[in-house]
Image (cartoon, rainbow, N blue to C red):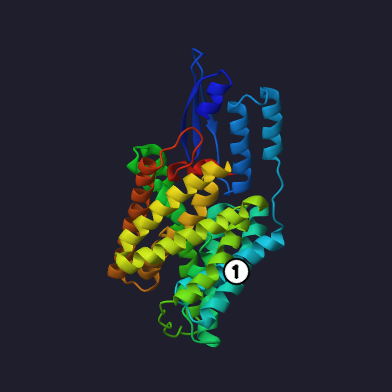
Amino acid sequence: MELVAAALGRPATFFSTPTAIFVTFDDEAHGTRLLRVYPGNTNLGRYAELFDLQRSIQDESVSPQEAWERLQNIESMPEGYSQTVQVVAYGIVGACVGVFVGGNSTVVTTAGVIGLIVGCLLLGLSRRQYPLHLINVIAGFVACSLACIVQTWIAPSNFELTALSSLIVLVPGLHLTISINELATQNLASGSARIAGAMTTLLTMVFGVYMGYGFVAAFHPIPESVAPQTPSLMASAFVIVPIGLCLAVLFQTRHRDIPWLVLSTLIAYASLRVAGEFFGPFAAVWIASVVAGVTSRVLSHRLGLPAAVMLMPSLILLVPGSLAFAGMAQIMLRADLPSGVRLMATMMLTAVAIVAGQLLTDVISPTRDLHYSAQDAHTIQS
């Protein structure tokens, strides 16, 4: 925004938090203004169009009036994918994540079906303008209730893994990582606000899971969960492309950018698995974060795309949201405080490893003018 203001001949300074933007125009004696904003859903298609508009303004290839008209058109852009496609994407992501977390066939199938239901709930309740945290509670309750019903009366399963897989799109792992990055780069106000919001989202979701578990347990004791098994390399690789395609749908990516988004998920996963063969888990995450960051910046610069199109799906595969969810579930459902605290600590260390990788990326591949970094992810909100 500072680059756009300078290109328009109105230099300005901006200070942003997840819920407010302060603007100070240098050529006005009393030019400071406050804009109240509200976080929205990630929309990479709209962000890419804004990126193109920003370049046009800086190149002076459009007039301010033309830029304003394009901005209004971008704001009114329809969603690139139908609601049916989005709901199917929720289901496929749930099933694929069920493979990643080591669930058996019952977990994978159930997570896919519950993912479809969660997708319907999200779209339907969002249209009715339900508060986000209430949606999280309802989704957590429905997902855990159905997972426990399957485990109790249908087939051996693992309701924790099933609920996690079906709710993975709602888990605020990326926001937790971004908040750590903002704190590390001395953006204390924004980082503190973001980590508080992410933890609130996580707590409301886990509370819904807790209520769903208690609801089913009140009628019948829930059997022991089946222990997870480490998925084979072939099984994990088989679900990478579907996950990439579904992330393209859920992030509202432009159709012509989908191949690059899928490529980024393949690069991130391959680097994580290769590094994991030689290094510990935190070092592997750090290496994968560096590879994903450098690759996204180099290719995006050559392709004329915002780096976010490739970086965000890469980070999604690395972010520790599932660890945070599992840690809170251990504390609330199992009353296992040591295990829960250990998982939460692992989550924080994983987030730090990702942030360290992105900070090194800034050194290896420094940004020039138009750029994206993990701390700027809130600018992608629709």
Disc 1 residue type (three-letter): Ile
Q: Which residue of the protein is positioned furthest toward the front in this rendering?
A: 302
The answer to whether residue 342 is visible is yes
In the rendered view, tell whether residue 231 sits above or below residue 166. below
Residue 27 horizontal/vertical position (percent): 51, 13
Residue 262 horizontal/vertical position (percent): 56, 59
Residue at (33%, 49%) from the top-left corner? Answer: 356
Quarter placement of the C terminus: top right
Residue 88 horizontal/vertical position (percent): 65, 66
Residue at (33%, 56%) from the top-left corner? Answer: 348
Residue 349 horizontal/vertical position (percent): 31, 57
Left or right placement of residue 242 versus residue 376 in this view: right
In the rendered view, tell whether residue 207 sits above or below residue 238. above
Count of all numbered marks drawn on residues in the image: 1
**Dot 1, how many residues are within 10 Å of its Cα: few (below 14), some (14-19), or many (20+)?**
many
Residue identified by numbered label 1: 92
Along the viewing direction, whichever of 225 and 255 lies nearer the viewer:
255
In the rendered view, tell whether residue 78 sits above or below residue 124. above
Helix, strand or loop at label 1? It is helix
Q: Which residue of the protein is positioned furthest toward the left in this rendering?
A: 338
Left or right placement of residue 341 versus residue 312 in this view: left
Residue at (72%, 47%) from the top-left corner? Answer: 78
